[in-house]
Amino acid sequence: MDLILYEAQRQGRISFYMTNAGEEAYIGSAAALEPEDEIFGQYREAGTLLYRGFTLDQFMNQCYSNDMDLGKGRQMPVHYGSKALHFQTISSPLATQLPQASGAAYAIKRSGKKNCVMCYFGEGAASEGDFHAALNIAATTSCPVIFFCRNNGFAISTPANEQYKGDGIASRGVGYGMHTIRVDGNDVWAVYKATQEARKIAVEKHKPVLIEAMTYRVGHHSTSDDSSAYRSKKEVEDWKRHDNPMVRMRKWLESKGWWDEARENAHKATQRTAVLKSFAAAEKRKKPAVSEMFNDVYDKLTPNLIEQKKELEELIKKYPAHYDTSNYAKEN
């Protein structure tokens, strides 16, 4: 999916994309959560949504901002969200999800539910003020929240050794009086076990936990980035070959006799076909109805929005050549 959508952006078919390459072991954290645990993602957690049941069609519809997009075309690609899957919609501003996660965890604590909040972010986001506010709120109010830091070595183009002094992000959790775990972020089973233990602490003791998963971003930060400008291609290739989560998982499966080259090739072919089918279907769909730009701003349309909507409808009707709506869905 990453490969196909990345190339689609390069072809001008979608506007933006971010891959998960090199950090895929975080999916182990998804396996350690319960379905009703709330998730606040950053933008590189597509595997978590996939694990919870977000379909290929839903991924494609969001990236194409078509009429079946759950976000109604209002977000950039990869800014997924699903109320049904307890995955809060991703927003672009860095680190805003951290204090929101603390607030949601406090609400869960007050409700008496045996659930927690999982909040993903990168080590670059830990340089934002929201990070410190979030950890302090969670620690002082004893909230059931897991802060999962994917330390992939780069905040876009800034390497970790230029971002901060000290020993990574884990030491900050200790500073806030939190249970803290540093884990091999390229080992899916280590990530699974660390999250499992963190969830137990969060739910049973109502205590926040910080996990720092040490990993490496193999791909560019996004389609707006060229990482060869600030790191060598040899460095990236070495990580791909030796410490890549996918390579390690495959070798482990093969050592158990549960996987081989034939199964690998068959699986890749099957998945590629499924992704391309969803991709083609999403590309053919129309954009959301024009009226959707006015809906959901408030519970009910306010007088000024009603006036603006009416004015737009009149302009479309008066100048159809300048306001072509043929590629938009019909009004309900």
Image (cartoon, grey):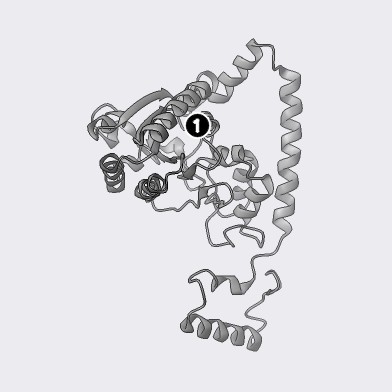
Quadrant into which the C terminus falls: bottom right
Residue 13 visible to an observer of this rendering = no
Give the residue drawn at x 65%, y 11%: 256
Pinpoint residue 177: horizontal percent, then vertical percent. Answer: 25, 32
Query: Foreground: 198 or 323?
Result: 198
Q: Residues within 10 Å of mark 1 (few under 14, many from 20)?
A: many
Residue 292 visible to an observer of this rendering = yes
Vertically, is 139 above or below 92? above
Give the residue drawn at x 62%, y 39%: 3
Residue type indicated by callout 1: Ser
Image quarter for residue 210? top left
Quadrant into which the N terminus falls: top right
Residue under label 1, please give it.
29
Disc tally is 1
Query: Foreground: 328 or 294?
Result: 294
Vertically, is 52 above or below 168? below
Give the residue drawn at x 62%, y 58%: 69
Tell whether 67 sits left or right of 133: right
Give the residue drawn at x 28%, y 39%: 139
Image quarter for residue 48? top right
Query: Foreground: 79 or 261?
Result: 79
Vertically, is 174 above or below 287? above
Tell whether 159 sits left or right of 115: left
Query: Foreground: 49 or 328?
Result: 49
Tell whether 111 sits left or right of 189: left
